[in-house]
Image (cartoon, rainbow, N blue to C red):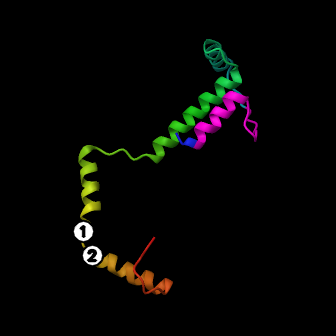
Amino acid sequence: MSLWLVRQIAVYLIYGSGPVLARLEARLPADVHAILKRAAEIQGRTLTDFVVSSACEAACRTIDEADIIRLSLEDQRRFAEAILHPPAPNAALRRAVRRRRKLFACDRPFSP
């Protein structure tokens, strides 16, 4: 979870709202509403607070899972090896560099 998001959540939980509010409406089955209401009561929170914080936590998990690449130990070793000892440029890479230099009219080496 990003530091910015943690701060936004803290502001919301402490002060009840952040500087900018947006509205979200949802229609849901009565049994789902009852489950959410019961869970909110168990935690001593309002239904709105429970739904917003739960949705935010789920969204953060989803974003983290998409942003973080998890590698096996063997894949980590291969990745580190490729960074520390990159292979020599092949013909296709040399052609791509020449094409880039021609397109961007630059004489200096590639820098992102």
- Decide: is 4 above or below 54: below
Give, as a three-letter code, the residue at label 1. Pro
Tell me which corner region of the image, top left, top right, bottom left or bottom right, holds residue 51: top right
27 left or right of 74 in image: right
> Cα distance, mark 1 to mark 2?
8 Å
Q: Tags 1 and 2 in contact by the CB under 8 Å rule?
A: yes
92 left or right of 37 in image: left
Q: Residues within 10 Å of mark 1 (few under 14, many from 20)?
A: few
Numbered badge on residue 64: none
Q: Nearer the viewer, residue 25 or 50?
A: 50
Circle 2 residue: 90
Q: Position of residue 89 (x, y in %)?
A: 28, 74
Is 22 a magenta residue? yes
Secondary structure state at the residue bearing disc 2 = loop
Read off the magenta span.
Answer: 4-25
Circle 1 residue: 87
Name which residue lies at 67% across and 34% down. 11
Tell me which corner region of the image, top left, top right, bottom left or bottom right, holds residue 56: top right
Give, as a three-letter code, the residue at label 2. Asn
Name which residue lies at 48% across and 42% down. 64
19 left or right of 82 in image: right
